[in-house]
Amino acid sequence: MDVIHSVPELRERLRREPDNVFVPTMGNLHEGHIALMRVAKPRAACTVVSIFVNRLQFGPRDDFDRYPRTLQTDCDKLREAGVDVVFVPDEKAIYPEPQTYVVEPSDLQNILEGEHRPGHFSGVATVVLKLFNLVMPHSAIFGKKDYQQYLVLRDMVHQFALPIEIIPADTVRAPDGLALSSRNGYLSATERSEAPRLHRVLEEVRAELAAGTHDYQRLELHGMSVLADKGWKPDYVAVRRRADLQPPVNGERELVVLAAARLGKTRLIDNVEVDRPAAGGAG
């Protein structure tokens, strides 16, 4: 496994690897990340992973400075997973000058996560486009835990006609249902025992939707109320269309339920997909 820090060295190394698949990360890797590598490995001769904590996607209330940097442990895990190239640039390598040209995603960037984290998706799309231009993969893997991010990047690739297939990977969960996330490490022991409630709330909403309920607002408000009653500070519980995260109308069958909430000082996000029955149902 080659660990590369500079752009010229990366380009030289990948000149010998025209067939590569790419997994961008911010490091502090856990089993959810390693699952992405397992999805990636069979798809190309060369698996490339980047580790870069991207300042552009952090807002003033976010945790850029305290985001864990665990490079040695990360590299050990990636080596064991069979990754071929790890690109670990510093900020000067990615942003040698102020990044005045940025990607502004569609209105999708202004709802849900975008409403609560202004500028976040512009920062994500800008750095991912730059990494795509450096790595030039034929496919890239993104976890569906960050569902809105996956859609933003899928649409960016489509609209810019990039020759890259965006492949979503299922969320990896702890045995108690909590979605694996680097930020889970911020939780106290008491908070960690409470954290799976977020997924349980989503599952309850999914069950009602699958049973045919159409009163989306009631489900959303009830979910937020359950979280708030247990000490969470919910930003949203939302029932949306999977295709574009717009509010569904009756008859929509492919839905996703998304939630974001703070537990103590830690903000957690999660989602579950829902396939509604073809017709009928309560509501």
Image (cartoon, rainbow, N blue to C red):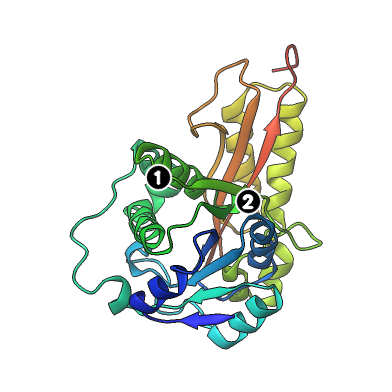
Query: Where is residue 268, by image quadrant?
Result: bottom right
Q: Is residue 128 above or below residue 55?
A: above
Residue under pointer 1: 162
Mark 2 element type: helix
Mark 1 element type: loop
Residue under pointer 2: 227
Query: Where is residue 214, by image quadrant?
Result: top right
Residue type (three-letter) at the residue carrying disc 2:
Leu
**Mark sitting on residue 191:** none
Q: Position of residue 182 (x, y in %)?
A: 58, 70
Residue type (three-letter) at the residue carrying disc 1:
Leu
Q: Position of residue 243 (x, y in %)?
A: 53, 31
Q: Residue furthest front?
A: 16
Q: Residue at x 63, y 51 (%)?
A: 227
Q: Residue furthest right?
A: 175
| Crowd class of label 1 (few under 14; some 14 to 19; many from 20; radius 10 Å) | some
Q: Residue at x 18, y 60 (%)?
A: 100
Q: Quadrant of the C terminus?
A: top right
Q: Residue at x 76, y 63 (%)?
A: 174
Q: Position of residue 267 (x, y in %)?
A: 53, 62
In the rendered image, is residue 264 in sight? no
Q: Position of residue 27 (x, y in %)?
A: 53, 74
